[in-house]
Image (spheres, rainbow, N blue to C red):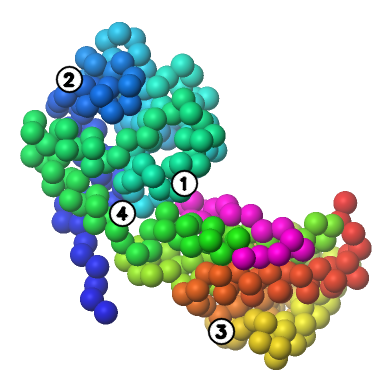
Amino acid sequence: MTSPRLPQAWTSEHSAVRALSALAICHPDEFGAALSSLTGFELNNIDPESIRRELLDTDLTFSARNDKYAFLEAKIDDFASTEQMDRYADRFPNSAGILLVPACDAIDVVEVLTERPTLRAVSWSDLLHKLEPTNPLAGQLLNDILLLAGLPGTKAKTRRLLGQALTTLGPEVKVELTYADSRYPSLDYSVPGTWVFGQVQGTRVATSQPKFSAKIGFFADEHDEVEGESKINMCTALHRAWEVAERLETENLVRLSRHRSPSKQQQLFGVEHPYQARAYHLSHVGVATKTSYDAAEVALWGYELARAFAAISTEIWGMKP
């Protein structure tokens, strides 16, 4: 397998936005005219001194001399979300909102625009093609952006695969498409009325096709790590969960990881092997599946584990309020 081509100058979303802000400051009239024609907003005659990068976490903010303010959120590797755009709209009320993306017809972009029709989406290609006659660096920037967006393991592509996997699951387990730290996409699993919780995530390497795995178990907090009834209950739940998971594996409903790297939870909860107590400190603890390039396969493994662990949760802790 050949390695994907990598950008030459602007190698991340962050560096690309820095380059865009430099173009905007150097060529404010052309930048404003391009955005005006692509969005319908009146953004001509941008004041270059108003251009700010990463003001209140927003990629770019600026104002035109007609007192029209705007904020711009740029995406290349990442995906667009209504939640994020709403947050910026609250921080910059009465401003024009622009979403700069590789493709305006991408599913995540269409979802955001459907929910918030006052926003406008602009493709990097359309914007930079308009700026290239003024500054040839715009063309080089576009080439790097297209390479970044085309990498196989971007957050946007990982999210799309998880979203497709979500449609294959039944109603007994609540599964939500969300994201973990650093906005890496995930599927979150829970069973209403129980303490079951887990996640499916992909590997975090943009240059590689993502491999997915599930970690399914039970909510855990500091009380479960202190000697007493809470810890005893968690120890019991984890022992039973592993027994159930192995039974599901014999029925070809799941494939379990038996990675033996150290696990703090193994010592805390007294399980025989580290792979019987995996997941995240003070979040949840349970078992992990093997990895697979097939997001739908792993999503189903997580579903089967969560559904089976619900009975254990109810027996040990009763119904969750």
Q: Secondary structure at mark 1?
A: helix
> Quick check: 244 left or right of 273?
right
Find disc 1 in the rendering and name its residue. 108
Q: Nearer the viewer, residue 79 or 14?
A: 79
* Above or below: residue 221 compared with residue 258: above
> In terms of image quadrants, where is residue 311?
bottom right
Disc 2 or 3, which lies upstream in sequence?
Answer: 2
* Above or below: residue 232 compared with residue 114: below
Find disc 2 in the rendering and name its residue. 29
CA separation in Å, label 4 and label 2: 28 Å
The magenta stretch is 168-185
> Quick check: 111 left or right of 6?
right
Disc 4 or 2, which lies upstream in sequence?
Answer: 2
Which one is in front in this view, the residue at disc 2 or the one at disc 1? 1
Three-letter amino acid code of the residue under disc 2: Asp
Find disc 4 in the rendering and name its residue. 149
Residue 232 is covered by the magenta coloring: no
Three-letter amino acid code of the residue under disc 4: Ala
